[in-house]
Image: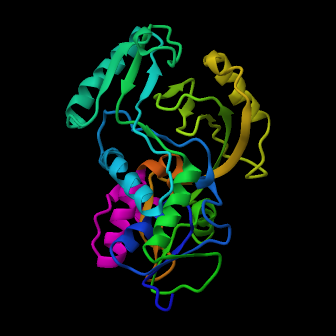
Amino acid sequence: MAIVDVTVRGAGIFGLSVAYACASRGARVCVIDPRGVAGGASGGIVGALAPHVPEQWNSKKAFQFESLLMAEAYWAEVAKISGQPTGYVRSGRLQPLADDAAVALAQQRAEGAAELWEGKAVWEVVSAAEQGAWVPPSASGLVVRDTLSALIHPRQATTALAAAVRALGGEIASDGPDAGRVVWATGWEGLVGMSDQHHRQIGNGVKGQAVLLDFDAAGQPQLFADALHIVPHTDGTVAIGSTSEREFADPTAVDDQLDAIYARAMAAFPMLADAPIIARWAGVRPRSRSRAPMLGPHPFLEGAFVANGGFKIGFGMAPKVGAVMADLVLDGRAEIPDAFSVDANL
């Protein structure tokens, strides 16, 4: 590629979504990552795209809502351009309700969803028994069913997104110089590096561990219970995750904390008890100080930009993150919520 308009440092979900948005608008893009596509947390196995609860509405929740609504068309287009599957399906989610207080709160949230979700998705309290065999155990006999939640196969999706960038004329490289406008999407190490240049922590990494089972529940909703995500992928596997570890010695090592997650999942979801384990995974997710994505001009590199801090919601935020970052990088148009600004983390 002789001339590059935009260099993106980082081939995780945020870096690739920015590169894809820029390439879709005709920019010549180069993505650089020495670890390759999805070499960090974006190469995980869980892929639960779940909304924040529909109450105490704010700019972060509104942004995520819009991005989740964009996702179906977005990932369909990525699959079409790349010729590769992404594992995306908007199959909804079921959550158990433990007691009368939980039921009352869920019903209040259903009223909030009816207003805030604009009729484009529902959050409702329904009978667990009427949901079939694929349902979390519920002491109250009731579950929350929402139709905004979706799931995606992280490795498939990032691989397809990289292929779509290439199909649009972009380049993916392991090394190379900065050229044109530069976007830093370097994950948790990037947040730690910025923190080292500042008088307080800007962000850090939170390790997560997950397990993948050989169990075909394709087309079923994801389940959430006992802080566990149970994600039935379209390829006939089920992912279970994950831990949240602020302190760790080895970013990619699995250990007894994953064993504990697996044991809890087997107790809560006995239908999975005989499913063979295909893979165990560990990786570190980037968490900004504000817990929201960190988007905008880079705080320490003049003329550069940053897109980081996806933490647990990176894939759900990706369609809109790519769009607003392309607006900023290519056109100088800032439509990023204040809660996502770099200043919110400084």
Q: Is 178 situated above or below 280? A: below
With 37 as the anchor, is 48 left or right in this view? left
> Residue 336's x, y, as percent?
32, 62
User: Viewer-proximal residue, 219 or 202?
Assistant: 219
Q: Is 51 situated above or below 22? A: above
How does the figure colour the protein chain or chains? rainbow
With 164 as the anchor, is 72 left or right in this view? left
Q: Is 144 situated above or below 72? A: above
> Residue 294's x, y, as percent?
45, 60
Q: Is residue 341 magenta?
A: yes
> Residue 328's x, y, as percent?
33, 72
Q: Is residue 83 magenta?
A: no
Q: Residue farthest to the bottom?
A: 2
Viewer can see residue 67: no
Viewer can see residue 147: yes
Count of marks placed on residues? 0
For the point 25% across and 29% down, which residue is it?
Answer: 112
Per the rendered image, the range of residues in magenta is 317-345
Q: Residue farthest to the front?
A: 83
For the point 58% across and 60% down, which residue is it?
Answer: 201
For the point 51% across and 65% down, which residue is it?
Answer: 163
With 27 as the anchor, is 288 left or right in this view? right
Q: Is 78 situated above or below 131? A: below
> Residue 35's x, y, as percent?
68, 67
The main secondary structure of the magenta stretch is: helix
User: Viewer-proximal residue, 61 or 74?
Assistant: 74
For the point 58% across and 61% down, which residue is it?
Answer: 187
User: Viewer-proximal residue, 291 or 333?
Assistant: 333
